[in-house]
Image (spheres, rainbow, N blue to C red):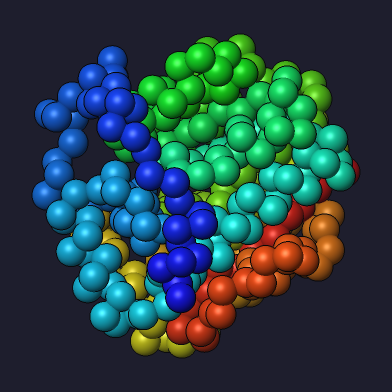
Amino acid sequence: MIDGVIDGVVDDVNDDVNEDWMHGKSWSPEAIDTKVPSVARMYDFLLGGDDNYQSDRDACEQLLKQVPSSRVLAVNNRRFLQRVVRTLAEDYGIRQFVDHGSGLPTQNNVHQIAQAVDPDSRVVYVDNDPIVLAHGRALLEENDRTAVIQADMRDTDGILGHEETTRLVDFGRPVAALFVSVLHCIPDEDDPAGLVRRVAERLAPGSFLVVCQLVSDRPEIRRFVTDFMAEATGGHWGRVREEHEVTEFFHGLQILEPGLVEVSTWRPDTELAPVQQTDEWIEWGGVGRLV
């Protein structure tokens, strides 16, 4: 049953676009080590995509053996992102989005949802994976209201001051800054809560911050996943946290109803039931507004 659900979340990209991706201006085979799994490509695999390498698939299979709910978690997380963007665009009039750690394009991406509400909506995707950059730019070549930039998520000045960001985003108006399923990639020593705070300080009143991250109340799961992902990705990982720690990301923000929750329960679709989630680990988060 889960395979059928994933088919509804991910759309295979056609051969012509794949060919364009492979000849993207900023991509070259030397730019990546395909033997080292990437979080973005592992996520793509868990969603049923095909933009991943054998190392990514092997790592996911090992993860699924120990934590079988990982695939379900990825689906629920993707649906959360889509619901949040639609809600902010339709109900709160947000027309500018900066998606930190956006990952590989799938189906119903942020710009597609936002621009379905208002074609003039502006979206900046940010990721540090060169393949994400090439794939995204190929897909968005004719969309001048959307950009993909390669940057380290911790480089707030570099992201918000990037020429593509300043071309598209007016920081004098409300913006939605998205940190969806990415802050667990940031280790404590790099102060992920401080990262979110620095972005919030640059946004206008009425802006929103969207945050969710992997959590578990089972110490053995937190320890296993943290150690496994750190080793698999060559150290490009933070840690699985506890629910109460996610509250730190929303300091000083007005949290929208229903508060901080398991993401499949955040304003769920009336026509699409959430995929059943186990208690091994979950994505926990919500939406905060600057007032």
For the image, the number of numbered tags is 0
Quarter occupied by residue 273: bottom right
Nearer to the camera, 4 or 30: 4
Residue 62 image offset from top left, x and y in percent? 22, 73
Q: Left or right: 128 with respect to 92?
A: left
Q: Residue at x 76, y 52 (%)?
A: 288
Q: Nearer the viewer, residue 158 or 257?
A: 257
Image quarter of the C terminus = top right
**Residue shown at 50% from the left, 65% from the top:** 5
In front here: 207 or 82? Answer: 82
Can you give x and y, in whole percent of width and height, for residue 258 in the image?
81, 67
Residue 238 higher or lower than 115, as above or below: below
170 to 193, vertically: above or below: above
Q: Residue at x 57, y 48 (%)?
A: 179
Give how far across and how far down residue 276 sits, in percent.
Answer: 56, 80
**Residue 287 higher or lower than 104, as above or below:** below
**Whether residue 161 is situated above or below residue 72 in the rendered picture:** above
| Residue 262: % across, % down | 64, 72
Left or right: 80 in relation to 251: left
Foreground residue among 253 and 145: 145
Name the residue: 61% across, 52% down: 81
Q: Is residue 82 visible?
A: yes
Q: Is residue 27 visible?
A: no
Q: Quadrant of residue 56?
A: bottom left
Instruction: From the viewer's perspective, tell me whether residue 42 is left or right of residue 100.
Output: left
